[in-house]
Image: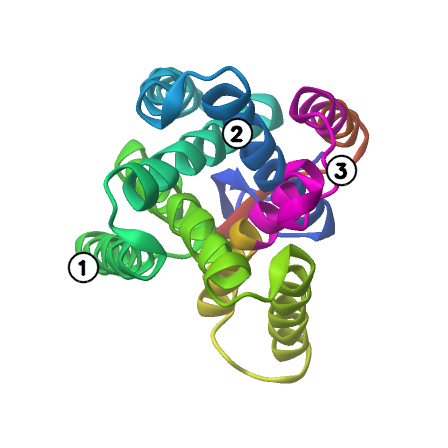
Amino acid sequence: MTSNPGEIASKVPEANAAFWIIKILATTLGETGGDAVSMSMHLGYLVGTAIFCVIFIAAVSAQIATKTFRPVPYWITIIATTTVGTTAADFATRSLGIGYPGGSLILLGLLLACLYAWHKALGSIAIDSIHSPRSERFYWLTILFSQTLGTALGDWTAIGTGIGFGGATLVFGTALAAIAAARRWTQISRTALFWGAFILTRPLGAVVGDLLDKPLAEGGLALSRYAASAAILALIVLLVAILPQRPARQPA
């Protein structure tokens, strides 16, 4: 892959088709993997969150330490945010009794506050501007909040409204299709559309994960969480290996 000396490479990938395919799979894995540890292993949401927090801190530290975009550490960190987001959201909404609406609104507030602080501090929240440790820390904190929000929002939509996991999958899939159409046929800010799509892929992955592993009585397919997680992880590894990915770039 050649580089243009008149451009600065970002530490994160360009948002192409490969990126979105792997991102949706990663968010689905976060749901099945998080549930496998907290529910199937009977460790509980708090212990599961503690375990995944340690993994996330190690992964994001390794990712920030890299000098250039590398697909493997990047996607390991993404998966780490989805798993800790799953257990943290479940702990807040279920164990602490905040509930889906309250948890979703709190997390949305934290997410918007993070984006505002990022923009105020560095002047841009575009992915092609992420090429310093400071901007990358903002990026990963924003992603962590978005992944946690997505779990609560997905559960609220599927369970709280009663439309089920299949109905919620249709809702979020339609919303993402609308964003794709807006990108193709409107002049809406590409950065705004990116973050809108990024946030919505998480509840989509959450409800798809629940659709796979929840009991039949709850509207799921009752698949093994371990088997589903292993299959999704294997597919992610294959796609990371074969699909072309390159860093986002901005003019120097």
Residue extending furthest toward the front: 217
Residue 84 located left or right of residue 205: left
Tell me the amino acid under the disc marked 3: Pro
Give the CA distance from mark 2 to mark 1.
36 Å
- Residue at image location 60% in from the left, 47% down from the top: 205
Tell me the amino acid under the disc marked 2: Asp
Tell me the amino acid under the disc marked 1: Lys
- For residue 35, the mark is 2
Q: For this rendering, which residue is in front, 34 or 41?
A: 41
- Residue at image location 23% in from the left, 53% down from the top: 110
Say whether marks 2 and 3 touch (CB < 8 Å): no
- Crowd class of label 2 (few under 14; some 14 to 19; many from 20; radius 10 Å): many
Say whether marks 1 and 3 touch (CB < 8 Å): no
* Residue 66, percent from left and from top: 44, 20
- For residue 244, the mark is 3
On screen, residue 72 above or below 93: above
- Residue at image location 26% in from the left, 37% down from the top: 134
On whether residue 87 falls in the magenta region, the answer is no
- Residue at image location 72% in from the left, 30% down from the top: 232
The answer to which of marks 1 and 3 sits earlier in the sequence is: 1
Give the CA distance from mark 2 to mark 3.
31 Å
Magenta stretch bounds: 204-233
Q: Which residue is mark 1?
A: 120
On whether residue 229 falls in the magenta region, the answer is yes
Give the CA distance from mark 1 to mark 3.
33 Å
* Residue 19, percent from left and from top: 65, 45
Residue 156 located left or right of residue 18: left
- Crowd class of label 3 (few under 14; some 14 to 19; many from 20; radius 10 Å): few
